[in-house]
Amino acid sequence: MGATQLNVLKVLLLLTFTEIISADHDVTFSVFTVTSKSMTVQWSGPSSASSYKVTITPKNSSKDPVFAHFSSYFVMGSVNSLSPNTLYTVQLEALDNDFNVLSTASTEEMTAPEVPSIIQAYSKHSDSITVEFTESPGATSYILRAEAEDFFLEAPVSSSPGTILHLQPFTNYMMSVMSVNSGGRSQPSYPVKAKTVVVAPQLNITSPDNTTLVVTWPEVENAVLYTLCIIQEGSTSRLDVNTTDTMWSFDNLEAGTTYCIKGTAYDAEGRPGDDVTYCKITRPQSPYVSYIQLTQGRSIGLSVYWQPVQGAESYIAYTSDGQNCSSIPENYFCYILSVECGQNHTVTVTAYNSAGPSSPSAPAEYITYPCPPENIMVEEPEAGSCMLVWDEVLLVDYYMAFIKRDDGEELSCNTTETNCSFYCKCGHTFLTSVFPYNEAGSSPFSPIHNYTTIPCCPQDVAITLVSTETLEIMWSTVSGAELYETTAEETRDVIHCNDTAPVCALSDLRCNTVYSVTVTPCSELRGCNHTCRPHAHETAPCSPEIVTMTQTDPSTYSVLITNPNTPNTNYTVTATGHNTHTCQTTNTTCDLTQLPCGSVYDVTAVASTAVGQSLPGYSEPLETGPCCPTFVNVTQVTQAMTNVTWSPGGGARSYITSLTSLHGHAKCHTQENHCLMGCITCSTNYSITLEAISSTGHKSECTYQGFSSSPCCPTGLKLYRSANNSLRVHWRSLGPRIHSHKLWHQQNTMGSQSTSASPGHSQFPAQEVILASLGDGKSVNKRG
């Protein structure tokens, strides 16, 4: 059973079962299957039931219900005489021996649509049959059934006509149709016999020449006749032929033209089977070679041109010496590389398409250029008298010799011999070439022979100092020179440079040294010219080095450098940091001034002369002392403790603050901008010094205006009652700087009085103090 048949059976099973509905726990009930006029139900009931009654009532109709009785031995039963495509209420009653109802169950189900009838069944393809049938009211789809010996197949369709596929060719089938709705399927219609047609012939088309197409095919089973129809592409005319053979030849066709051939097989009943169409192009006709051209280049090439032919997909040109080239349809030429010189051959062109090649074109002859001569050389038996000679070349009518001097002067020589004489001036290079000629033309190229006389000395030597220890020497090229030898010489050293270019760089020279530079031109054949005069040139000064850097005042540093050069050398010392400071000298010392505090510099020294400037010497770091804070504030916290604050100092990382007096001193070391200092003596003048320290340990001493500590508080405070309602206060003063005291007293009545007195004692007038309250918590405070 195939996959399609299994899928159909799955659909049928889904359509046969409906939901089981039970009214009581002791009975189950369901509709097993439906048809157009019947329903089959199944159940299970209580063991006490002696019979079952099935009642089927139209839900939306006034028709009478239909019922049936079944004994307790039955678990399934059918009820007939129903109406198609009708919704029914189905009820099951379990009865005892007295026909009393023990339990009931009910459900709703629809009958299948009416059974359709087949109008006709026919086959247009070897694997299918089409069925036309009447459609049933209420049907949502239909099922086509094809049956044969050992074959069963069903296929769903939506409406009429419907086609069932996957059948065998030339086979009889019994066809029937069933209607389907949500309730189920109807009974099959009355079967109708139908037969599938034969398969199409499998055509094989070949083109043995450009006017013929031969069609062959294997014999089709159950076929008695074949029809072939041929149509030229782009034409409306057609040719039909009938045959019982399995081969046919179409002749007198157009070359390079596409034809479409349709083949159909017929059975003994005259029914046409499947048809198949194949398109085939005939072979192209032979091209015509229209033009042959020899092209010059690094090697001789052959360009072949032809007239295009219809239907060609590509072209190939063949030479008689076995070479070929190909082309696409859009190009009607191709190019054969590396054709040998001095040859006489023929070429033909063949057109190709999917059917095969055309016949070759008529051969066309061509002749190649002569080969170039070998062993070209120049002989100079006497100075200034030269002869150009070469080997003889076969099949040559005459030679053209060309002699070109390097200054542009050209000579030519037309001869049938293998030599040519010319005047050759010393100090020049001569380029010589020889071209042989024949009836096809000249050789496409000739070997070029160079001949150079002894070179002359360059006259425009230019020497430039491109770096401190490198000289660049430039000059104009000299005729005949193949190599230049450049030397720079002094008493202790000789530097060489050999190059073919008219420029040379002599490096790794000694600084502050005068060299003798000579350019000597050379050639491989003639040697070197050692008569050229030398040129003197000096290198750049040597780099000075920093020996020491000494601070002479807060913003000035004296720099001591080495002096490795000759007199009249200028030196520049540069300090680079947030800003740049320089100083210049002709000796070994130089002062860098106005260097701000709290700064870091890289200090380098450079030497310069009229020749150029040296490389900078090795840099040395220079760090100026940190900046002193712009202000310092001292705040008295208690009589013996002060808080000192100051502004940040540029370049400072920590500070040492000192308060100094005749009675002692206090010191604080901190990274903050403030410090709390104790052990302060009252009524004492202090000097303030601050030491700013950088991260590398550089220090700056800073001095600020001093301050006086607060006056000392008096001691030995005593109170005495006096007559006239007065109070006498007595104390002892500390410190030499107290000029006056102020006394203040407060009473419980929220009143207060104060007075000032010279050192020693004070009295409050009677009118200012209420004596009655002196014993009730008066307090007297002294402020000084």
Image (cartoon, helix red, strand yellow):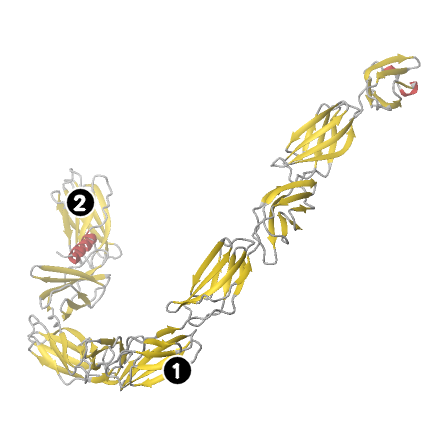
Q: CA distance from mark 1 to mark 2?
A: 126 Å
Residue 151 horizontal side relative to residue 547, left or right: left
Question: Does residue 494 appear in this view?
Answer: yes
Question: Could you say which disc has been placed on residue 43 in the image?
Answer: 2
The mark that comes first in sequence, 1 or 2, is: 2
User: Is residue 441 visible in this depiction of the protein?
Assistant: no
Looking at the rendered structure, the secondary structure element under dot 1 is: strand
Disc 1, disc 2: CB below 8 Å? no
Within 10 angstroms of label 2, few (less than 14), some, or many (20 or more) residues? Answer: many
**Which part of the image, by quadrant, shows the C terminus?**
top right
Identity of the residue drawn at 8% across and 79% down: 243
| Quadrant of residue 316 within the rendered picture | bottom left
Label 1 sits on what residue type?
A: Leu
Residue 306 vs 450, above or below: the answer is: below
Amino acid type for the residue under numbered disc 2: Trp
- Residue 48 coordinates in the image, percent (x, y): 16, 37
**Closest to the observer, 676 or 382:** 382
**In the drawing, what numbered circle is on residue 411?**
1
Q: How many marks?
A: 2
- With 463 as the anchor, is 729 left or right in this view? right
x and y percentages locating residue 82 in the rendered image: 18, 57
